[in-house]
Image (tube, rainbow, N blue to C red):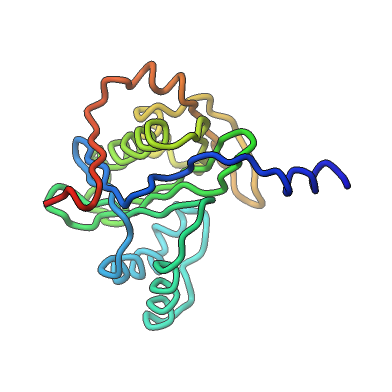
Amino acid sequence: MNSQSWKKLFIPKIKTKSEKKISIFGYKTIIRPKSKKDIKNDFYWRVDKELSDLDATLPINLSYEQFERISINDLSKSSQWSEKFSIDNFEKEHIGNCMFYDVNRWDKSCEFGIMIGNKSYWNGGYGSDATLGMLYYLFRETEIENVYLHTLASNIRAQKAFKKAGFESPKHVKKGRYEFIKMTTDKETWLNKFNDTKVKIIPEEEQD
């Protein structure tokens, strides 16, 4: 049996998410579990060419009914390798989404992704605030110790927001025809810098 086969048999057990459904309250945003009420916004954001370009992908080619069925099915599933969230403003308006995925239990790492779909909230600090909240959650509530992301090399606005939230060490990476910047952060470095961040993690049953 080769080393890769042994690794599959003995996958380390680490905590990758909260045992309860939670919401993360930052300075400007509330990160909460995905729900059916998000589907309409999610669909319009996924067919938007400008948003797709920023995500280095193509707009989806699905009807709303098809997308709705897939989304409802996804809501019924749970994975220890990823988790999706919605981003609200303090008026509880759905303005974007974020997630962590590709959890590697060996090096306790994951990739982070975020999109502020409501363009009225661009350049307002909402993306960096939600990123800050998600890192706080990952480093305080899970055993993940290393987080990385990829953003287009041309997306300077996003890179500034990620740096503000604690991502560092930019490195150029090419994937297909796209040029990305890979940015990283780790638990020790991030907590040393943001230990006093006023983020609250509240279980769903304790919310008003």
In the depicted structure, whether residue 11 falls above or below residue 88: above
In the rendered structure, the answer to whether residue 73 lies left or right of residue 104 reads left
In the depicted structure, whether residue 65 falls above or below residue 202: below
In the depicted view, which residue is nearer to us: 201 or 51?
201
- Residue 18 locus on image (x, y percent): 38, 45
Residue under the image location 33 percent in, 50 percent down: 20
Residue under the image location 23 percent in, 37 percent down: 26
Residue under the image location 39 percent in, 58 percent down: 50
In the depicted view, which residue is nearer to us: 50 or 196?
196
Q: Quadrant of residue 125?
A: top left
Report whether residue 142 is seen. yes
Report whether residue 157 is seen. no
In the rendered structure, the answer to whether residue 154 lies left or right of residue 158 reads right
- Residue 56 locus on image (x, y percent): 52, 54
In the rendered structure, the answer to whether residue 15 lies left or right of residue 115 reads right
In the depicted structure, whether residue 115 falls above or below residue 73: above
